[in-house]
């Protein structure tokens, strides 16, 4: 591929990541340009799939058809067919450059498709147990971690399970933050058996007013926050297993996500009256530490 076309493809992917990635983008900045390009391309690929699956102005069956068509076009591009999609061009180069198995990208799309296939039309999207939810989290988040560590670089095979569990921590944090937003879209990701054991009905979550959680709901949310904290331990163990040059980026990402979880906890798990977020000033403070770390690592690796 012509270098100019590839540069444009990566620039388009970086623009998507900068516009949409929120927490992820701050971690990208701490990476070298080739790794930042690859991560941005993967993010843009995820964004395309997610946008196709989530466009609620289109019937679910048609969204599924469009997603299948998009995936087929990606498969053709991945195996060398001409494509005008800059994201496909960038992702194809990234997968080759960093030896990323194409099966991981298929799993990513399968996770996105779960929201289309999971529940009968008209029924809320729910998960019976945490084991069921874990599978969903694996596909939409852990797979991202497995792709990222290939871009970051690692040698110890233990990194793969730790990356999987770090993805679970991130997705559980997202689920807690988005309880009200997901309920408005007829989705409840908190496991049904845990709702029942805490004395919380599905309808209570689906129809929750903009009011603080009840004591039972707060206990339910807190138990899921504790579970997320458990999986964040894997992120700490993963950090020393990836290449030193990539560690600041992973540290930035984990620090921002854990800060988000801490804000939910400090709000006493009130995810119904406002959506938790990490303030820009805090993100920039975390990023500044990551950039200093990056500069220090580069200086001493020469």
Image: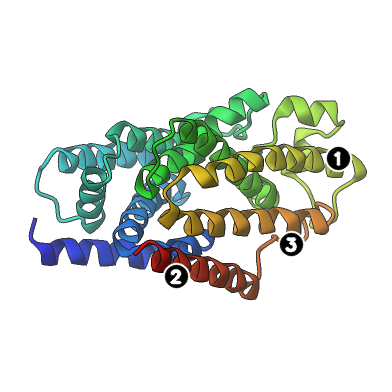
Badge 1: residue crowd in 10 Å (few <14, some 14–19, many ≥20): some
In this rendered view, identify the residue nearer to me: 246 or 170: 246
Q: Estimate the spatial distance between the alpha carbons at disc 2 and disc 1, rounded to whole Å.
A: 43 Å
User: Residue 166: x percent and y percent?
Assistant: 56, 41
What mark, if any, has residue 274 been given in the picture?
3
Label 2 belongs to which residue?
Answer: 295
What residue is shown at x 42% (from left), y 65% (from top)? 300
**Label 2 vs 3, first from the N-terminus:** 3
The vertical placement of 180 against 297, above or below, is above
Above or below 232: residue 268: below
Question: Which residue carries the number 1 mark?
Answer: 219
Residue 240, placed above or below residue 223: below
State the residue at coordinates (19%, 41%).
Answer: 78
Tell me which residue sits at (28%, 35%) in the image.
102
- The secondary structure type at the circle numbered 3 is loop
Q: Residues within 10 Å of mark 2 (few under 14, many from 20)?
A: some
Q: Tell me the CA gap for discs 3 and 1.
A: 18 Å
């Amino acid at each position: 591929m012509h270098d100019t076309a590839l540069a444009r493809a990566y620039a388009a992917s970086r623009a998507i990541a900068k516009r949409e990635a929120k927490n992820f983008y701050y971690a990208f900045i701490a990476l070298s340009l080739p790794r930042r390009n690859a991560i941005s391309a993967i993010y843009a690929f995820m964004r395309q799939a997610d946008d196709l699956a989530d466009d609620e102005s289109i019937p679910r069956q048609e969204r599924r058809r469009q997603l299948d068509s998009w995936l087929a076009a990606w498969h053709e591009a991945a195996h060398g067919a001409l494509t005008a999609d800059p994201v496909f061009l960038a992702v194809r180069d990234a997968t080759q450059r960093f030896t990323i198995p194409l099966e991981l990208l298929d799993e990513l799309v399968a996770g996105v498709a779960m929201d289309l296939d999971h529940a009968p039309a008209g029924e809320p999207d729910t998960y019976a147990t945490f084991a069921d939810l874990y599978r969903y989290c694996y596909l939409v988040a852990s797979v991202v971690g497995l792709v990222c560590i290939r871009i970051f670089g690692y040698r110890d095979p233990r990194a793969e399970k730790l990356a999987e569990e770090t993805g679970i921590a991130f997705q559980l944090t997202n689920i807690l933050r988005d309880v009200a937003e997901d309920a408005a879209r007829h989705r409840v990701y908190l496991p049904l058996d845990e709702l029942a054991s805490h004395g919380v009905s599905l309808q209570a979550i689906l129809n929750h007013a903009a009011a603080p959680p009840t004591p039972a709901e707060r206990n339910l949310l807190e138990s899921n926050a504790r579970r997320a904290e458990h999986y964040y331990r894997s992120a700490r163990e993963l950090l020393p297993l990836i290449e030193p040059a990539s560690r600041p980026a992973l540290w930035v990402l984990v620090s921002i996500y854990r800060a988000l979880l801490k804000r939910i906890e400090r709000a006493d798990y009130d995810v119904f009256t406002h959506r938790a977020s990490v303030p820009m000033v805090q993100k920039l403070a975390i990023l500044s530490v990551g950039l200093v770390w990056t500069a220090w690592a580069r200086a001493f690796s020469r």
